[in-house]
Image (spheres, rainbow, N blue to C red):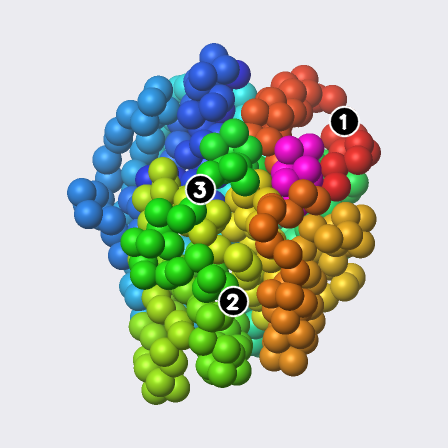
Amino acid sequence: MKFVIYSLNYSPELTGIGKYNGELARDLVKRGHKVDVVTAPPYYPEWQVHKGYKNTWSVENDEGVTVHRNPIYVTKNLTTLKRLLHLVSFALSSIVSLFKLIKLKPDAVFCVQPTLFCAPMTLLFCKLTGAKSIMHVQDFEVDAMFGLNMSAGKVEKLGRAFEKWCLKRFDVVSSISHSMLDNAKKKGVPQEKLLFFPNWSNTEFVTPEIDGSEFRAKWGYSAEDKLVLYSGNIGQKQGLEMLLDAAKHYEAQPHVKFIIIGNGSYKEELQAMAQNMNLTNLVFKPLQEWEDVPKVLSMADVHLVIQKKGAADAVLPSKLTNILSAGGFSIVTAEEHTELGNIVDKHPGIYECVEPESLEAFIAGLDRLLAQDMSTHNVVARRYAEKFLNTAMVIQQFEKDCEAIIADTSNLYASRDDV
């Protein structure tokens, strides 16, 4: 199979979409497939081009994957306009790299949303080459933008019309949750074109057996401290202000410590807020090296997956997969009707699901977890990861699905019990 991944994000980004694209591409190469990636220089989640990379056109080899880098507009000071410029810049700069692959005559093009602006050129490219077009939705960026009140009115109507036009014209639309696939169906995508392709975790690498005491000692925590960890992108959509309020609430319990690991466009503002609140029980740490992630996860007593209202089915948090694989105890802010709410209904005890943007509900959930016996791992979470999130299993199924797509097999929507 000759396969093209068309996406803003790729390895060596350590979190989010770039991490998954890198793992997918390298795994497919190991399975004997030809993989080209059209992407940007790594910039996420710091929102600046990583050291060692130039913001220009280049080609590199990543363990057998041919990676075509394209320049982008990137800035830490995000506004609605600047975010749109960022997305459009990649869609425009990557056109030449994409169409250089016409002679390759790929079997399939895997266009990852965001950004939706790449969809028209993907469709044109596939029409010219005969390749199957797959739109993979990691984030419904239109829903995320307007759901978080970043814009409104005529612009919103235009954005939603453009999204619907694009989605309906792809051969297949895949996504990481069933509720996101239902959302695609509401946007006009026929059910027979829908494909379930979840994010995954290396359950052999991230395990409950990893000892996190090294990082506790390194960062000055005792065995008696209760560590509450948020790790990942620090952006506005997370609603992390509530975490600062929770830390203020627990100041009277000095053994409860809060840690925020990561980078993002909102980090400096959040740090300034924490400083103004004089929080002594909360620290910020940079993203850790990937080989240290299992130790960091095992170090924490409670993990946090925080989002604002309306975000849970537009952007399913990728950080949750590794938390579950580590057998972590976690709090997830999501409405009951969302995918995250449905999972906890089917697998009681997998995590605490609490109302988004409610400090009272968040603290109540945290109190419940801190009162539990955490001398062992969360068995329900680990069992779920082993059954549904194993890397080899997920990518092997995707490989089979791609073969069916190329062979024009219809009705791909997963009827098997995936959650």
**Residue on which disc 3 sits:** 211
Tell me the SS state at disc 3. loop
Q: Amino acid under label 3?
A: Asp
Amino acid marked by disc 1: Ser
Of the residues tagged 1 and 2, which is closer to the observer? 2
How many residues crowd mark 3 within 10 Å: few (<14), some (14–19), many (20+)?
some
Q: Earlier in the sequence, mark 3 or mark 2?
A: 3
Q: Which residue is mark 1?
A: 410
Whichever of callouts 3 and 1 sits on the residue coming sooner in the sequence is: 3
Q: Nearer the viewer, mark 3 or mark 1?
A: 3
Which quadrant would residue 231 be assigned to in this image?
Answer: bottom left
Q: Which residues are magenta?
A: 381-388
Q: Nearer the viewer, residue 206 or 390?
A: 206
Q: Position of residue 347 (x, y in %)?
A: 77, 48
Given residues 202 and 100, the one toward you in this image is: 202
Residue depicted at 79% across the width and 35% down the height: 417
Q: Is residue 383 magenta?
A: yes
